[in-house]
Structures are given as structure tokens and as C-alpha cells.
Amino acid sequence: MGMSVQRGVGRNGGRRRYRRSRVSSEINVTPLVDVMLVLLIVFMVAAPLLSVGVPIDLPKTDAKALPSQQDPLTITVDADGLVFLQEEEVPIEDLVAKLVAISDAGYDERIIMRADKDSNYGAVMRVMARVNAAGFSNLNLQTDPINQ
């Protein structure tokens, strides 16, 4: 009596077929959300650092902010009486000449005057008088809100 042994059991003869998984056409948004949250945190931390570069302690008032269409020129007087136009230190004698050179709107240019609360009142008034005598009439003083 002979016995026969079949090599493959089942319909495929013992070979297993693996199904290939289908390619998903859906977009995985989880990495995108992660990147956006990291960027949000980075910008929230960096935004306060983008203010004008001369560090001063502005006086506090409850005045409202003026509407702004364009970036104004900034003159800063620090506690030591040094004068800065934008972020560059300038001698008070050269201030008007540099203002005229960089103002886009001529004598109607909006100018923001920033002065440290511990600065000399006379130094601030000298700067304001020079700017006003040169013909610039749109001169504004900047302060910090009281609740800050």
C-alpha cells in the first residue's frame, strides 16, 4: 500500500499571496498642523522684538493711538540726551538735514518723537524746536499706555 503525500495544501498549492495595499490618495494634515503651530509660536515670540531698535522707557498715558497709513519717521531721545533718527545716532546739528534727505512726503512727512521718561526736558524741546523750525509740521509724541 502506498501513500501519497501532496506537497501543497489548499488551493494555491501552499504558496501564500500577499495583498498589495492600495495607495491612499488622502493628504495627511497632521505634519502640516504641527509645522503651523511651531511657526505660530516662533512668530508670537519674535513679534515683540521687532519694535524700534533704541531701547527707552516711554512715559505712560491714556492717549489713543493715531491711525497710520504708512510707517512714520522716528526720532528718539534717550535718557542720556543722545538723538537717534530711526535707529542711527545723529548729532542734533545734522538732524534736520538727514530728515529732509530721507523724508518721502517732504515737509508733510509724519514724524514720531520718542523720548525716555528720564530724559532732559530741554533736550527734547531742542529737538522738537529744530524739527518744527525746519518746516515739518506733522510731529507726534509717542507714549506707552498706562495699563502696560
Image (tube, rainbow, N blue to C red):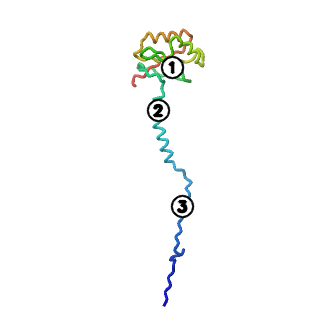
State how far apart marks 3 and 1 are (Cα). 64 Å
Residue at point 42%, 12% (across, down): 120
Q: Amino acid at mark 3?
A: Ser
Q: Residues within 10 Å of mark 1 (few under 14, many from 20)?
A: few
Q: Which residue is mark 3?
A: 21
Circle number at residue 8: none
Q: Quadrant of residue 123?
A: top left
Between the C-alphas of marks 2 and 3, the distance is 45 Å
- Closer to the camera, 64 or 12? 12
Q: Amino acid at mark 1?
A: Glu
| Label 1 secondary element | strand
In this picture, residue 96 sits left or right of residue 116: right
Label 2 neighbourhood size at 10 Å, few (<14), some (14-19), many (20+)? few
Name the residue that disc number 1 marks.
88
Q: Decide: marks 1, 2 in contact (CB < 8 A)? A: no
Residue 46: give its label: 2
Indicate which disc, 2 or 3, sits on the residue closer to the N terminus: 3
Please state which of residues 34 and 7 is positioned toward the viewer in this rendering: 7
Give coordinates of residue 89: x percent, y percent.
50, 18
Q: Position of residue 13 (x, y in %)?
A: 53, 75
Residue in view at x 56 percent, y 15 percent: 98
